[in-house]
């Protein structure tokens, strides 16, 4: 139940009072926190008018200026963690592109959105989806398609479970992807949406890129598909750096630029 009941509020206040009285939290810290809240409420004029005109929301939220800024942030933060001589790409040699999309959830709109962006950018691209419990026949079909490809693009939509795990690919999917990477050792490019930890187990990729930004606890912000396409086309160069520690090989600040 996301709604706070009066009893819950009362218990929270009582707990805060007890914490101050026991010396766990100082009254000065409480004053400083309250001052921050009041400052920002005043900056937003909430002390004069705390109501929102719902009719004005479309003209104030998600406008073109906001979308352009979000895309600029995505372009600047896209991080290249592995590049075994793949980037920059010579698309004059690329005729047949196969896109393999791995998704953690049965129902997820992001993979289809990303696939649509990729096929718009690269007409003729073929997308295959691997979902939870995909049959062996699906893997076999993808393998046959991959054998004929000049370039394999892998999209990963395996989000972290916050405080539990880093969203690892199931063993079956890992084995299959390693087989693809061995088959196309010079042309398998992985793009992970929101989860940099996959690079630890998929280090055999020709190139590995990651985009950030989490919707709730999930890392599948599709705006990074546009950035990834720009990277493939040579319209941008990678500028991002890891904001977290992934491993000794990929510490904070990791990121390839060229």
Image (cartoon, rainbow, N blue to C red):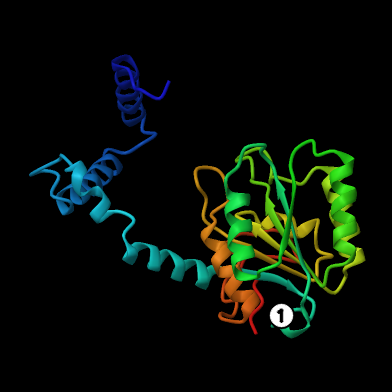
Q: Residue at x 25, y 55 (%)?
A: 60
Whether residue 90 is visible to the viewer of this picture, yes or no, is no
Outermost residue toward the front? 124
74 vs 169: above or below: below
**Viewport quadrant of the N terminus:** top left
Whether residue 173 is visible to the viewer of this picture, yes or no, is yes
211 vs 50: above or below: below
Q: Residue at x 21, y 42 (%)?
A: 54
Nearer-the-camera pick, 240 or 245: 240
Measured from the top left, where is residue 163 in percent x and y?
Answer: 62, 39
Measured from the top left, where is residue 84 in percent x and y?
Answer: 80, 77
Mark 1: few/some/many CA within 10 Å (<14, 14-19, 20+): many
User: What residue does disc 1 label?
Assistant: 87
Measured from the top left, where is residue 56 in percent x and y?
Answer: 19, 49
Element class at badge 1: loop
212 vs 122: above or below: above
């Amino acid at each position: 139940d996301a709604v706070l009941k009066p009893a819950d509020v009362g218990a929270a206040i009582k707990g805060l009072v007890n914490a101050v009285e026991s010396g766990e939290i100082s009254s000065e810290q409480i004053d400083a926190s309250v001052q921050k809240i009041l400052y920002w409420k005043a900056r937003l004029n909430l002390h004069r008018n705390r109501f929102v005109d719902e009719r004005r929301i479309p003209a104030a939220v998600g406008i073109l200026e906001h979308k352009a800024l979000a895309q600029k942030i995505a372009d600047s933060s896209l991080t290249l963690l592995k590049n075994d001589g793949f980037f920059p790409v010579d698309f004059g040699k690329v005729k047949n592109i196969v896109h393999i999309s791995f998704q953690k959830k049965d129902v997820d709109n992001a993979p289809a959105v990303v696939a649509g962006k990729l096929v718009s950018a690269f007409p003729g691209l073929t997308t295959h989806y691997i979902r939870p419990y995909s049959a062996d026949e699906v893997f076999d079909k993808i393998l046959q398609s991959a054998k004929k490809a000049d370039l394999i693009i892998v999209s990963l939509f395996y989000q972290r479970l916050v405080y539990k795990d880093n969203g690892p690919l199931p063993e079956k999917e890992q084995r299959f992807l390693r087989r693809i990477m061995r088959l196309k050792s010079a042309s398998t490019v992985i793009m992970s949406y929101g989860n940099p930890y996959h690079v630890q187990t998929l280090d055999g990729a020709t190139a590995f890129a990651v985009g950030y930004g989490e919707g709730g606890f999930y890392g599948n912000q599709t705006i990074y598909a546009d950035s990834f396409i720009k990277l493939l086309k040579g319209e941008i160069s990678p500028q991002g750096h890891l904001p977290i520690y992934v491993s000794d090989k990929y510490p904070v600040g990791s990121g390839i630029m060229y």
